[in-house]
DNA sequence: TCCAATTACGAATAAATTATTCAATACGAA
DNA sequence: TTCGTATTGAATAATTTATTCGTAATTGGA
């Protein structure tokens, strides 16, 4: 900030050419980036040596130093506020970055809604379980598969009934040191609630990851994790929803990595 | 961020002197501020011309450009990244938020490394393809499955050979209006490159999503998407890698949602 | 108003920095 | 091994930056 400020402050006590330079730089700060001393001189209409002397008068060793100082100054000021986005998620119309914005929002909400103790409970439940059954509503099948894969990779005995026809049978064979994971969006899915209830009768622990609202699946669970859906158009909302589910799952996996056994 | 990232990513395929330079710059980024090309050359122990050539090889006009880019990169990292992340995900220390930190970093890097035009090309390639074969190295199988599922849900004719034994056969039956998607981490996987080459002989377009470096799979592709790996301990790195892959895939899906048919 | 005395300015030039050429050498694939 | 390619640094060209110096403009008194 200092450099540009200094220029503004001294503007009044400057000579004609110096003021021309100062004004130009203050108005076209970002142009300086790729101007050499003589280019700047031409642009302003002064001699190249004046540019150098101007730099030195402001206390810099020469033109390159001034240039850098101006750049620092500009970056410091502009970044924090408006230009930061542009720089940060550089090409702002790339699908990656626009999605990134929304995703960030959803993930933030998801982070803030889940209580640390529920997560911790989920992690130790998974770690301590003998077998893990995973059940999902149609919209979360791909996420469920992903979870299953990750758990198997970690050495957990996880099973996911792709079609859903065997859900009840598998649940019936669970024991009290097993875990049932339910993934769904609304949490109203009849069959899932049914499975959860039957499992609980056997003393099986139930973990649910659902949309954040008052729903049947969540109510009938011992451990409750949530996802906060976005407010976008339906298809995109589903995408973001799964993304957030995946985020929670990644958190579980990373928790398991940190505290193995 | 891009410049320093690029250096890190390319480090492995650099020549001796180039690597020396890269290492020095990565380790002493802030020193560069007041080093001339020959000072840097002396500090590293190479010739001044090597410094210039290094700059040019990385895509800059010359040493001053590189210097500025490094400076931007460094400043950008210091401000935007750190501060912003702190603001967003700092509330608690639950597994969700600590993971969030790292994840954000990886995603940011991934966003900044992928060119918008490559993404756009990927999206239209998927949209226009008659059939899409998906092939993946072991570490990316779960991601590949996820991608397959999403594409099927969008009505794209996608197929993924789980075990990998049929890869070649399926590839051979692709036509020139088809697409082959390759997902892998290092991109060296023999069989995948082989599949890509055979497919290309049939005029099939190849899209790759690999770790950001100079790798065989990427080279033999028409459309190249990348993921920038983190520097964490291995298991976590893999987790984050997949997460970033998923992010790119989500971007593709969201792109397809926006421009259907 | 006029006259030093100081300051500002730019052309010319010196100095420094950066970029290119080129020849020697190292490296890899055949 | 051999050929072709890539890497490297010394020499040098080109560009950029800094200084010198002479002239012009400005200031501040008589």
Image: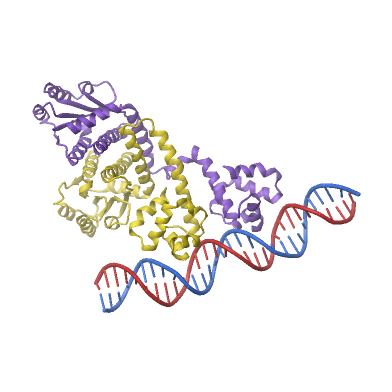
Chain colours: A purple, B yellow, C red, D blue
Looking at the image, which is closer to me, A117 or B139? A117
Quarter location, residue B105: top left
Residue at 64% x, 47% y: name it. A22
Viewer-side residue, A82 vs C28: C28
Residue B209, horizontal then vertical, whole percent: 29, 49
Q: Is residue A219 left or right of residue A231?
A: left
Q: Is residue B67 above or below residue A100?
A: below
Pick the quarter of the image with the C terminus of chain B.
top left
Please tell me how many numbered marks the rendered image carries: 0
Q: Nearer the viewer, residue A30 or B2?
A: B2
Residue B208 left/right relative to B111: left
The reply to whether residue A164 is in sight is: yes
Q: Residue at x 47, y 46 (%)?
A: B75
Name which residue lies at 39% across and 54% down.
Answer: B7
Residue A230 in view: no
**C7 sits left or right of A231 in the view:** right
Which percent across, then down, holds residue A1? 56, 42
The quadrant in which residue A181 appears is top left
Please identify the quarter of the rendering in which residue A48 is found.
bottom right
x and y, in percent, of residue A261 in the image = 20, 36
The residue located at (27%, 53%) in the rendering is B186
Q: Position of residue A99 (x, y in %)?
A: 36, 39
């Amino acid at each position: 900030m200092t450099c540009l400020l200094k220029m503004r402050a001294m503007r009044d006590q400057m000579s004609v050419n110096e003021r021309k330079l100062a004004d130009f730089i203050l108005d076209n700060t970002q142009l300086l980036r790729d101007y050499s001393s003589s280019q700047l001189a031409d642009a302003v209409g002064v001699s190249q040596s004046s540019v150098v002397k101007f730099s030195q008068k402001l206390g810099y060793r020469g033109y390159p130093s001034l240039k850098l100082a101006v750049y620092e100054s500009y970056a410091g000021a502009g970044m924090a506020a408006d230009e930061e986005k542009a720089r940060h998620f550089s090409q702002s119309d790339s699908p990656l970055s626009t999605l990134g914005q929304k995703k960030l929002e959803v993930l933030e909400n998801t982070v803030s809604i889940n209580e640390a103790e529920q997560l911790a409970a989920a992690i130790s439940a998974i770690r301590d379980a003998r077998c893990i059954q995973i059940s999902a509503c149609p919209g979360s099948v791909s996420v469920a598969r992903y979870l299953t894969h990750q758990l198997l990779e970690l050495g957990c005995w996880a099973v996911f009934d792709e079609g859903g026809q065997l859900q009840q049978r598998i649940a019936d064979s669970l024991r009290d040191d097993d875990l049932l994971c339910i993934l769904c969006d609304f949490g109203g899915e009849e069959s899932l609630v049914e499975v959860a209830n039957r499992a609980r009768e056997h003393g099986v622990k139930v973990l649910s990851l659902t949309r954040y609202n008052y729903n049947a699946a969540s109510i009938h669970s011992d451990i409750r994790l949530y996802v906060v859906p976005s407010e976008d158009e339906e298809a995109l909302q589903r995408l973001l929803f799964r993304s957030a589910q995946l985020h929670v799952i990644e958190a579980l996996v990373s928790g398991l990595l940190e505290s193995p056994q």
